[in-house]
């Protein structure tokens, strides 16, 4: 009986490790990328950096910058388009949070405008938040030097 339970435990553990570690291990086409983000030559703190790579743009790696504007992310090797965003979370209203299933209904145009007015505002130019408009792209390879991403607050 004990042997059978141990075998079940070993099988369940192996399955868990395969599902959560085996699918995104060292051979998943991603490498660790480090770098920093500055805006107007000052570190951009608490921002979100996203790397969009892969042949179809379907591999995403995201990281947050620290108090020095530094980040570390796992990104796809090859050409990656990069986005940077920073939102004013202090002014986010509770009304913009997702509602429970019972409360979800298609909002009216007036409700949409109200939600948009209460949604967090971007603290940097919004062009940096889209891979199509950011103008940021990097060739990612194993062992590369840290990246330096320089942004301007001018729109």
Image (spheres, rainbow, N blue to C red):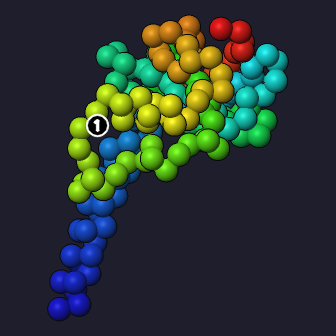
* Vertical order, 112 against 153 (above or below): below
Q: Nearer the viewer, residue 90 or 76?
A: 90
* Vertical order, 148 against 113 (above or below): above
**Residue farthest along the right direction in this orientation:** 41
The residue where tag 1 is placed is: 107
Q: Quadrant of residue 84?
A: top right
Q: Nearer the viewer, residue 32 or 52?
A: 52
Q: Position of residue 18 (x, y in %)?
A: 30, 53
Q: Who's the residue at 30% across and 61% down the image? A: 16
Q: Is residue 91 left or right of residue 16?
A: right
* Vertical order, 63 against 54 (above or below): below
Q: Position of residue 19 (x, y in %)?
A: 29, 52
Q: Nearer the viewer, residue 32 or 47?
A: 47
Q: Who's the residue at 23% across and 68% down the image? A: 11
Q: Who's the residue at 75% across and 22% down the image? A: 38
Q: Position of residue 147 (x, y in %)?
A: 68, 21
Q: Can you say which quadrant of the picture contains the N terminus?
A: bottom left
Q: Position of residue 90 (x, y in %)?
A: 64, 44
Q: Is residue 95 left or right of residue 137?
A: left
Q: Nearer the viewer, residue 154 or 93?
A: 93
* Vertical order, 47 against 40 (above or below): below
């Amino acid at each position: 009986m004990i042997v059978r339970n141990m075998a079940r435990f070993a099988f369940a553990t192996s399955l868990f490790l395969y599902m959560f570690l085996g699918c995104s291990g060292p051979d998943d086409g991603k490498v660790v990328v480090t770098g920093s983000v500055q805006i107007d030559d000052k570190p951009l703190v608490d921002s979100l950096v996203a790397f969009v790579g892969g042949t179809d743009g379907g591999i995403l790696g995201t990281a947050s910058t620290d108090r020095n504007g530094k980040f570390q992310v796992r990104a796809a090797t090859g050409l990656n388009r990069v986005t940077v965003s920073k939102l004013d979370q202090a002014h986010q209203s509770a009304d913009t949070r997702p509602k429970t299933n019972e409360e979800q209904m298609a909002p009216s145009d007036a409700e949409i405008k109200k939600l948009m007015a209460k949604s967090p505002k971007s603290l940097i130019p919004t062009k940096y938040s889209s891979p199509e408009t950011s103008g940021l792209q990097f060739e990612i390879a194993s062992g590369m030097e840290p990246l330096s991403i320089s942004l301007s607050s001018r729109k």
